[in-house]
Amino acid sequence: MPAILKHRPSSRLWFSLLGIGMIVGAIGVINVLLKGHGHVYNVSREIPWGILISTYVFLVVSSTGLCLISSLGHVFGIEKFEFFGKRAILLAILTLLCGFGTIAMELNHPLRMALYAVISPNFTSAIWWMGTLYGLYLLLLCGEFFFLMKGMHKGAFTMGMLGFIAAVSAHSNLGAVFGLLEARPYWYGPFLPLYFILSALVSGGAIISLLVYFHHKESGALMPQRYEEFMDTLGRLQALFLMILIFFVIWKIIPGLYGHPPEKFEATMAVLSGPLAFNFWFFEVLIGMLIPVTLLLNRRTRTPLGVMYAGLLSTFGIFFMRYDLVVAGQLVSMREGAADLVGGLLHYAPSLTEVAIVVGAISLCLFLYTMAEHLLPLGGEEH
Amino acid sequence: MSEKRYAIVLDTRRCIDCKACTVACKAENSVPLGRNNYRNWVDEEALRGQYPNLGQSFTPSQCQHCGNPPCAHVCPTHATEVNPDGIVHVVDKKCIGCKYCQTACPYNARYYNEELGAVDKCTFCAHRVYEGRLPACVETCPTKVRVFGDINDPNSEVSRLLAKYPSRVLKPAQGTKPHLFYLI
């Protein structure tokens, strides 16, 4: 592993940070295994899904996005998008695995799931479909990665095509996990499956801008013309995705306010001016969408560095988008006269253990990717 | 004769908010301590009127043993089952703890029971009912708010009450077809 031992200060700092993150995560995992979910997680009877679920969503959205954007290259034949294929698919596999890890820590019995999802499947359950389709998607991603590594373009195309279909099916199904719940007006309806696909494109574009920029940075050379051109194209595409996303966000809000629909209105207000307002306005709107779209639309800031910054900010913003979406849907009590309400709403804030596991999962993902970058022959700039 | 279909009819005007039903349920079903852990509850409605003309109602409730139960539709492993008599219950060993049923139930009738290692809920005290006894909450109520029985039997007390008085169910627009009937 000579590449890791280059003793460059930035690389040492990077590995130290990831090491600390993974230790923190391991402490969280040990804590929950020793003490039990109920004692160390802040999820409750009324809000059973917390930050571990939203982080799972964040990670698998990233995976789907990486798959969709990279398919522009080796499935849809846009040459400019071909050169990062291996890296994008590899990271798609790792984000998906770390997402599975996060949800396994949220499930009380992940092993029972492995057994009973097979011998007692319920085909009307969106979670069953989500698990099955994501499992299939993982296999196809692995196949695609194998063919890309072997340089077998035909196989990579076939796997890529199937992977694309699986990605869209699995990911819209994840939206349906929320969207099919009639009991939760903030989530219910066809909006979320569609929104999840779009936001996957935003996530994928953002992460690929980081991938390409830092891969280049790591190689220490001047950025080749091709890379610069690619970053410019990606920046324009990302601006388009973000602007569509802004319309999606606006149209999520308007039906939540118009005519004060019961429960949906209270949940929407929780996002706009309630307990999630800071997350929404600062992280989602400003950091996640407005600053990136400004950077990307302005020709002077649409440099490789600017596109990378926009991607980084969007990725942060999207993490909060997932959190706010998951929590907002559960803040309104299902029962009149429920106790423990704060300002008419239920309350959730993640526990230290929950946050530790989130930090651990993201650190692990980045660590595995960095190691793979050093250990696997992912090739230079050429496809 | 057709299958049995169990239901509870409640006359909330009789409820004095003594919470004996919640205590009896916890004792009968070994429900663990803790704020999240309960199978039934009494909701206190807002105070009506102005002093000295005041009124308040209480709504005892539990799993509605829906005819169209969303919890059973969403469960990925069929851990939630519906008996032919309408009793909705959880098969503990199949529960993976995803809590999808908890997010799907519009009545917030479910909680995760750490001792059982599964999501838990009211079963109409099926273990008692199948021995010919009443659910604990029904038996203990000092003012006889709850009446339990078979609505497919036209001579049962529940059928006679539903014939005699108009009733409502909670959140009918959800389409869940609840089998807890509140007399109006």
Image (spheres, rainbow, N blue to C red):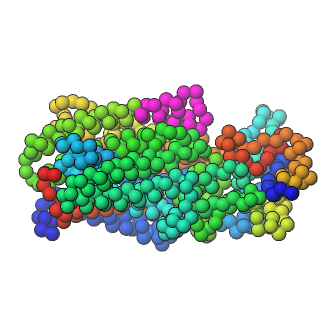
> Seen in the image, is A190 located left or right of residue B19?
left
Of A43 and A114, which appears nearest the observer? A114
Which region of the structure is painted magenta? A248-273
> Seen in the image, is A282 located left or right of residue A149?
right
Q: Which residue is drawn at 44% across and 40% down?
A: A194
Q: Is residue B52 magenta?
A: no
Q: Residue at x 42, y 48 (%)?
A: A169
Quadrant the N terminus of chain A occupies:
bottom left
Q: Give coordinates of residue A161: x percent, y percent.
A: 32, 49
Q: Give coordinates of residue A68: x percent, y percent.
A: 31, 46
Is any part of residue A36 visible from this angle? no
Of A163 and B155, which appears nearest the observer? A163
Q: Residue at x 63, y 50 (%)?
A: B70
Q: Give coordinates of residue A172: x percent, y percent.
A: 44, 46
Is any part of residue B50 visible from this angle? yes
Q: Can you name the residue that lies furthest to the bottom here? A: A34
> Seen in the image, is A196 located left or right of residue A308?
right
**Magenta span: chief secondary structure:** helix
Q: Residue at x 89, y 44 (%)?
A: B163
Decide: is A82 above or below B50. Answer: below
Of A46 and A274, which appears nearest the observer? A46
